[in-house]
Amino acid sequence: GVGQLSPSAQTMASGFLAVISVNLVIGFYIYMAMKETPHQEPQPDPTFLANAKASINQPTSSQVSDDSHGKGKVE
């Protein structure tokens, strides 16, 4: 068994077993990801989208103060 191996051989066997185990888990994960079928295109959250559109249409306080100082005037 494993108990008859030298300490360095036990370390090597444990390392190889760990590497093989990790590769199997990663391989299984990739297989399951490829097997998965996409249900539909991701859609944005309607509340977030409405808030984002509203924030674009509102002038910020810095834009209002810049326009009041004459930077927005065309002469």
Image: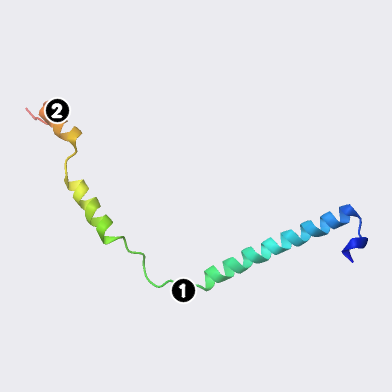
Horizontal side of residue 69 vs 43, given as left or right: left
Q: CA distance from mark 2 to mark 1?
A: 54 Å
Q: Nearer the viewer, residue 40 or 4?
A: 4
Q: Residue at x 21, y 47 (%)?
A: 55
Mark seen at residue 71: 2
**Dot 1: within a 10 Å radius of its alpha carbon, few (fewer than 14), some, or many (20 or more) residues?**
few
Secondary structure beneath label 2: loop
Counting the numbered discs, the total is 2
Instruction: Name the residue furthest front.
Output: 3
Q: Residue at x 79, y 58 (%)?
A: 14
Instruction: Name the residue furthest top.
Output: 69
**Disc 2 vs disc 1: Cβ atoms closer than 8 Å?**
no
Q: Which residue is label 1 attached to?
A: 37
Secondary structure beneath label 1: loop
Q: Earlier in the sequence, mark 2 or mark 1?
A: 1
Q: The residue under label 2 is which amino acid type? A: Lys
Q: Position of residue 73 (x, y in %)?
A: 9, 30
**Dot 2: within a 10 Å radius of its alpha carbon, few (fewer than 14), some, or many (20 or more) residues?**
few
Q: Quadrant of the C terminus?
A: top left
The answer to whether residue 51 is above or below residue 62 is below
Horizontal side of residue 75 vs 11, given as left or right: left
Horizontal side of residue 67 vs 11, given as left or right: left
Q: Position of residue 11 (x, y in %)?
A: 83, 54
Q: Quadrant of the N terminus?
A: bottom right
Q: How is the image coloured?
A: rainbow
Q: Position of residue 15 (x, y in %)?
A: 77, 56
Q: Nearer the viewer, residue 38 or 50?
A: 50
Q: The residue under label 1 is which amino acid type? A: Thr
Q: Residue at x 87, y 56 (%)?
A: 9
